[in-house]
Amino acid sequence: MQLTGAEALIKSLEQQGVDSVFGLPGGAILPVYDPLLDSSIRHILVRHEQGAGHMAEGYAMATGRAGVAMVTSGPGATNIVTPIGNAHMDSTPLVVITGQVATGSIGTDAFQECDITGITMGITKHNFLVQSAQEIPRAVAAAFHLATTGRPGPVLIDVPKDVTQSMMDWWYPSTIEEYDLPGYRPEIALDEDAVDRAVQLIAESERPVLYVGGGTLKSNATNELLAFAERTGMPVVTTLMARGAFPDSHEQHLGMPGMHGVYTAVTALQRADLLISLGARFDDRVTGKISAFAAGAKVIHVDIDRAEFNKVRHADVALQSNVGAALRALDAQGATPASMDAWWREIRSWQETYPLVYDEPTLEGPLRPQHVIASIAEKAEPGTIVTSGVGQHQMWAAQFWDFEEPRTWINSGGAGTMGFGVPAAIGAKVGRPDRTVWCIDGDGCFQMTAQELVTARAEGIPIKVAILNNAYLGMVRQWQEMFYEERYSEVYLSADLPDYVKWAEAMGCVGLRATNLKEMDDVIDEANKINDVPVVIDFRTDSSEKVFPMVASGASNDDIIVHPSQQGRAR
Amino acid sequence: MSPEPFLGTTSRTPVRHHILSVLVENKAGVLARIAGLFARRGFNIYSLAVAPAESHARFSRVTIVVDAESAPLEQIVGQLDKLVNVVAITDLAPADAVERELLLATIQTNTANRTSLLDTLANAGAAIVDVDPGAVTVMLAGTPASCDQLERALESFSDVELHRTGRVALPRLGEAAPQ
Ligand SMILES: Cc1ncc(C[n+]2csc(CCOP(=O)(O)OP(=O)(O)O)c2C)c(N)n1
Ligand SMILES: [Mg+2]
């Protein structure tokens, strides 16, 4: 069967089981948009290519399948660089297709030419410049294979216009050999010796902690985690990328560690004699000052990516494996710690002294942002998916929303990309139309990508957006308040400019506002009743609220600053 | 065969260097991927040589001398191995490798320096590969240390244009020398 390269590209996506593509056309990718008309694939027309990338990320994080985005060359391609970088930092499987100028024009500074494979070399797992139409099926199959196996990540396929316009004989690779990836071997045999040594370390430990990272979600190992945790009785912490990997309601769960982590989670890592790191990477936002991090702990480091071992922290046992297989192997050997009674007593006393708290809300307002989040959570149905932007609101959402299920918390961790929340929510809703999707956003973040609500309305994607409108780039304001003597430099945004309700309405969404407790309850109820169009709520929150606990940048986790109401308590 | 003499800090090679012999797919941009990785991770490349591997058009061999002081070797190898186009990495400790490098140099000659230049070349075992009335081009194929020595010896001559290829290496035959 003879097809054009463009037809082959669409057919290859169909072959991969792709149901949705997020994108925006232009000259170089034009040929591919024609056969799209006849395809079963749903295309979501975004208003900015950054939106397409974050939507694909949201889709991928909610479903576990690769998210797909398609854009044109030049500015279309550079506009999607931020999401690619974001996905690279958070190991999110993406396949990004970019149009490119015709092969004969490459290198001539042709109209809308840019070297997108060069630009994204350092922020993709791999990228391809496809040289001929016949190669398209192989490139697509290989891209999905690379994006979704081993340590997942973004893969970019750059397709010149003459390649999509020329003819090819249809074929599709049926075996991995045909992907032609001689240097890629994601499957690794478990090192039995390392398993034995891990079992030994566990048996010797009295103060172990399961340090659970995003890799646990990526490898779908949450059942194994629950089984292992319950059998051994060990305490569990879940990083920002792993919220939802272990139920928050579980009595062994200490919460999130790190810069804005729960006191007990942070301190348990500090005092542990053994860390079992499961798909986590000792990020500086978790470790604080690395030389002071968990100084008395041995480390069992489980990761699919061997370059993570000894990168930041010495691994006493490095176990290259996906998390599930490693936990099953440890379970099979019955790895069990020594008595943890004293350890749990200590942990429980920290929990009693330093629970996560916020100041009581007042009837009149302004609203307490943490209370707004807790109230939305309380009224949300189980399994609701939450996305966020980046800033204080993100930390409060991670702290005060209780996650019970994997893939219900979607945020930008490694890159900290403002503007991630709205498009990620749209992508999550496309992937999981059966779920309610809330975006907990900041006023600053909302203004970066809000235009995608036009996409959401036009495409019938009813998400709910809660703007915690504190009139500030709040997280930066917090640092200026605490570390720059309250010298506020370029962080004020205004609560009223823009008018978020009018803006929402102009984008075809329902716009609501709440300034006090009564209004807050009412608008949440109202939003929960709306299931056909997107809803945006402008919650007027207290500008001076800060995120606690906090470990200052570069400080030791021992110097954690607790909520003002808890300061001075005996530790 | 005995390992090369230890030249200490006067050697141009970092003391804690390692030789990575990297088999890569012969595809456009592979070298940029390797160079980019080293640059963004802050790994130092001391020298780099590339050529098609064996009689295969499909693969190339890249010999990279890395400064294991700039980053742990395990990190360098682990990150390099993640490049999809990298097929295999052999890490050769200097003591376990036979290393060779090619040096070419053009030196302006005159009646005053001719004798000492010829002595220098003879000492180093370098060959003259091109001449004209006012200059010679010489070649030395040898250990990196011998190239270092010749390079230093040529410092006393003015107007020297000198090129080195960067080394290639293979594992020593037989038992590895004690580290
Ligand atoms: C694209 C981008 N630019 C700048 C920053 C730095 N930054 C981190 S948080 C933050 C403030 C976010 O403000 P807002 O969305 O209002 O959230 P808040 O902290 O007030 O809850 C800024 C500017 C960033 N993370 N991303
Ligand atoms: Mg704000």
Image (cartoon, rainbow, N blue to C red):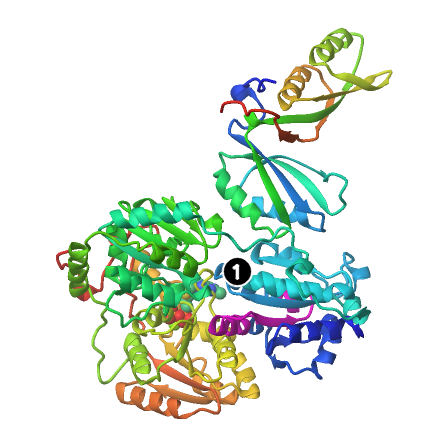
Q: Amino acid at mark 1?
A: His
Residue A209 horizontal/vertical position (percent):
28, 56
Question: Which range of residues does the magenta coloring cover?
Answer: A53-78
Q: Residue furthest right?
A: B133
Is A481 located above or below residue A557 in the figure? below
Q: Quadrant of the N terminus of chain A?
A: bottom right
Q: Quadrant of residue A119?
A: bottom right
Which residue shows up at 42% across the image and 50% down it?
A: A319
The number of callouts visible is 1
Which residue shows up at 42% across the image and 45% down it?
A: A310
Which residue shows up at 49% across the image and 24% down it?
A: B179
Residue A392 horizontal/vertical position (percent):
35, 68
Tell me the subunit letter for badge 1: A
Left/right of residue B51 with respect to residue B88 in the rendered view: right
Q: Nearer the viewer, residue B139 or B82?
A: B82
Q: Quadrant of the C terminus of chain A?
A: bottom left
Q: Which residue is disc 1 drawn over?
A: A88
Q: Residues within 10 Å of mark 1 (few under 14, many from 20)?
A: many
Left/right of residue A399 with respect to residue A355 in the rendered view: right
Q: Nearer the viewer, residue A523 or B157?
A: A523
